[in-house]
Image: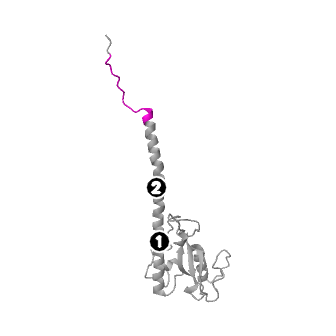
Amino acid sequence: MINKTKKHYRSGGFTLIEILTTIVIIGVLATAAVPIGQLMIIRQQEKILKEVLAETRRALDQFYEHYRSFPASFMELRGLAPPNFTIAYLRDAPPINPFTGDQYDWTVVVSGVTEYNDFGCYETDCLSLIDHNRKVFQNEADTNPGNPLAGKAKCCDACTGYWGIWDIRYPRDDRLAINETLYKDW
C-alpha cells in the first residue's frame, strides 16, 4: 500500500530569494541613511562655527571695552601678552575652524585704529597678521608683496604699526551653508 499522506518538511535555513531580498532592503535603507548622516554632520559643524564666531566677537568687544583698543595678537585675547596678563577673554585664540580643523584658517579683519596708523579695515589671513605684527615688534620692514598689510605700518625707530584684530571670518568665499547663505557673511 502506498502512503499518500507523506509530507515533505523543509530543512532549516533560508532560500536564496529570501537572503537576496533582505540584502536589497538593507541596502536601500543604508543608502537613504548616508545623506541624512552627512547633513547632520554639516549642521553640527555650522552650529560650532556660529558659536565660535559669536564667542570670538564677544571677546574682541570685551577687550575693546576694557582697553579702548583692539588686540594686536591672539595672545592678548588669551591673557598671555601685554597689556593683558590677568584676563583671558578666550581660552583658544584663534579658535579652531570646525570645517578644516586648522586654528589659523581664518580671514582676519584688522584695523589701524589700534595704534597710530591710518584708519580703516583690511582683510588678511591669520598667519600674515601674526607675521606682520611680529615684524613690527622687531622693527623689521614688512616688504612681503603677498601680505595685504605690507607698507601700511610706518616702521621707523619707534615703530607703532601694530594692527588690531577687529573681526574674524570664514576664509573661503565659495562655501554655502545649508540655508544657502555664505559662511564668510556670518
Seen from the viewer's position, the closer of residues 148 and 185 is: 185
Q: Which residue appears at 64% of the width and 77% of the height?
A: 148
Instruction: Look at the numbered disc 2 and give the secondary structure of its residue.
Output: helix
Identify the disc placed on residue 121.
Answer: none
Q: Would you name the residue on which mark 1 appears?
A: 52
Q: Is residue 183 left or right of residue 146?
A: left
x and y percentages locating residue 161 in the rendered image: 60, 85
Residue that protrudes farthest toward the top in the picture:
1
Query: Taking the image as drawn, is residue 80 in sight?
Result: no
Q: Would you name the residue on which mark 2 appears?
A: 36
Determine whether 74 is above or below 27 in the image.
below
Q: Which residue appears at 61% of the width and 80% of the height?
A: 135
Under mark 1, the amino acid is Val
Seen from the viewer's position, the closer of residues 73 and 81 is: 73
Q: Is residue 6 magenta?
A: yes
- Could you give the CA–CA distance between mark 1 and mark 2, rounded to whole angstroms? 24 Å
Q: Is residue 2 left or right of residue 67?
A: left
Discs 1, 2 touching: Cβ within 8 Å: no
Determine whether 174 is above or below 67 in the image.
above
Hey, which quadrant is residue 44 in on the image?
A: bottom left
**Which residues make up the magenta segment?**
4-18
Q: Residues within 10 Å of mark 2 (few under 14, many from 20)?
A: few
Seen from the viewer's position, the closer of residues 143 and 116 is: 116
